[in-house]
Image: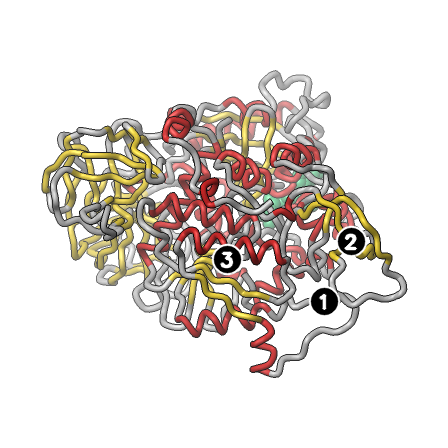
Amino acid sequence: MDLLRFITAGSVDDGKSTLIGRLLYDTKNILADQMEAIERASKSRNVGEIDLALLTDGLRSEREQGITIDVAYKYFQTPSRKFISIDAPGHIQYTRNMVTGASNADLAIILVDARHGVVEQTRRHSLIASMLGIPHVIVAINKMDLIGNSEDGYLQIAQAYKELAEKLNIKDLTIIPVSALNGDNIVDRSENMPWYTGETLLTMLETVNVLKDQNQDDARFAVQYVIRPQTEELHDYRGYAGRIQSGTFKKGDAVKVLPSEQESKIAKIEFGGNEIDSASVLESVTILLEDDIDISRGDSIVSLNNSPVISQDLEAIVCWMDDKKTLKAGNKYVLQHGTSRSRCSVRDIEYQIDINSYEKLDEVESLKLNDVARIVLRTAQPIAYDPYQKNRANGAAILIDETSNVTVGACMIE
Amino acid sequence: MSISVKEVSGISEQEADERRKTPDYLDQLEAEAIYIMREVAGQFERPALLFSGGKDSITLVRLAQKAFAPGKIPFPLVHVDTGHNFIEAINYRDELAESLGAKLVVRYVEDTIKAKGLKEQTGKNASRNWLQTFTLLDTIEEFEFDACIGGARRDEEKARAKERIFSFRDEFGQWDPKRQRPELWNLFNGRISKGENVRVFPISNWTELDVWAYLKREKIALPSIYFAHERELILRDGHLLNNTPVIEKDENDQIVTRTVRFRTVGDMTCTAAVESNAATLDEVIAEITVSRISERGETRIDDQQTEAAMEDRKKGGYF
Ligand SMILES: Nc1nc2c(ncn2[C@@H]2O[C@H](COP(=O)(O)OP(=O)(O)OP(=O)(O)O)[C@@H](O)[C@H]2O)c(=O)[nH]1
Ligand SMILES: [Mg+2]
């Protein structure tokens, strides 16, 4: 059985948490004691009916305010698939938490309140989903019960969303009318919207093909740790521990070590101490090379005749996440890319992206919390990267503030 | 059922190869956990693995073995012993550490209580669960651990469902749920200042059932209390607690003999048994699959005290 990670996104109160609660409830994945706890909590808050959002809104301040602050992870299973659901906050203030959840998602469900249509946060979250290269997007037009389940109302919003999506890079887009509160078109087909002939949300989640979303072509491996047992029997053992970022490696493959560009061949691949013939994307293995070369954490092993770009000059789309300090040209950070860290400085802010129109704003002096922009970086050491849109694993990087140690930027290298 | 060291060492090469041809969610979860373990070894100078003798930490040890094979696990196993642990879990802990040749550090809540003159809870529901935090923080300070790997899972509890995999803690061990660091892709940021530390949860994304399925797949033996056996228990408010001198009893408590197993193995004062005839891994898995009650709901008395009990403990430095 395979695994699908999906996130719910969209504006405040559009019903993201309720939708996840509903999915779990209707697939019978809420256990009796959890249901009782939600009932108790709903009663103590005088919210008439049972509030399914309380399933994911687990923090004290979330329950006090009735909003989501940070992402919650819930796990459920149907006969055909395992799911990791990620419930994101809608508030603009907590966008960085939404980005945290979205960065690992295979699919995003973007909710829209049928009464309000597409709003600023819909645009912001759609832009983020597109920049992060989330391969599948489902737009759930929610609270259909509040607009009398009107097909016209649905079509208007669907049209508005399609216009927005044209300016973005969304590979696979589906739109669906739902009521998270009542469970319409979530797991069961709605009798209130006979005009809708498409699939239910759950069927879409169960059938979307995620296997083909991985980069299977470009063999990349970032060294995390060098295993050197230094015992008598394993005196000369040097294994490079890491996770295959993309592509496949086989015993005997000709490879290159970056950034030093030394060449060698794969002598052996091991998993858990046992030899295996080959390893592909997402597998955590240990690689041994034929030649004795100097390799340490932060280096990469790649296929000999398919190399990433090696450079100290990078251009990247950045999502800025620091609520205290702004990003300005001249600022210095630590760039973490794969397992390597390098100091870097910001050469320039090329342009900022307007959240509403997706237009490029020139001559921007600084970036503040939640701004999205294209920046130019110069790193102290060369970085071996692939463009993010071609290779998510080897095109992603984070910026770390050198004094506070906090992660302040999400970078997608172009 | 005592553990055999051979069984811990795992599956045959052929079997391993067979499995790899059909990658499924368990393989993905395993690969992710191994990746996280290696990030800890790569990013920190003095990491530790918090080991309790329970099934989640047993799973962690197995993952650590695989992550660093054929080398040894490059960090010590650390156990904060409340003195109220099941003897079966303690024996398992000692045997496992010995068979791995791993360094085992045990620190006792009892000693912290004496040294600091802490006041223990009294009465029939007294537990040292909360006091563990003091011993843990002292141990972290004593060894200057900069990362502590723990077996917490997000499916266990609603505050845990919110926690990052690399969970930053300030110099007082405190978790601040409103100011968690962004955690993007699989780029874990373990940079900290001296005195601060990071709690790392490699099996964050595993469910209880995933852990059981993994233990079965890897043929890992468990402490015997996880399987059905006859035992003398205290029946209190519908919960079955081990009948031990460390739990104070009163006239409302009934002493009963039942066939039970433990679904979680924590401190005896706050871990309840479940009635069960499941004597093998398969039978346990079959029972859990159809169970309508969550693991902590059924067995953990400490969570049921207030709505945000776990969140509050974590803010105070708990795992
Ligand atoms: N009538 C109606 N109300 C809904 C529906 N879905 C959600 N709601 C209500 O909308 C309100 C907000 O729902 P939440 O699920 O908390 O919204 P959210 O998107 O998670 O909000 P944030 O996480 O704070 O951004 C609650 O009162 C829900 O009961 C729906 O389909 N119909
Ligand atoms: Mg919410």
Q: Which residue is mark 2?
A: B232
Image quadrant where one finds the N terminus of chain B: top right
Residue displayed at 27% across by 59% down: A334
Q: Amino acid at mark 2?
A: Glu
Q: Position of residue A123 (x, y in %)?
A: 46, 40
Compared across the picture, whether A244 is left or right of B239 comes to left
Q: Is residue A126 visible?
A: no
Nearer the observer, A345 or A114:
A345
Label 2 Cα crowd, 10 Å radius (few <14 / some 14-19 / many 20+): some
**CA separation in Å, label 2 and label 3:** 25 Å
Nearer the observer, B217 or A349:
B217
**CA separation in Å, label 1 and label 2:** 14 Å
Q: Amino acid at mark 1?
A: Val
Residue displayed at 37% across by 55% down: B40
Mark number for residue B94? Answer: 3
A140 w.r.t. A64: above or below: above
Callout 2: CB less than 8 Å from ligand 2: no
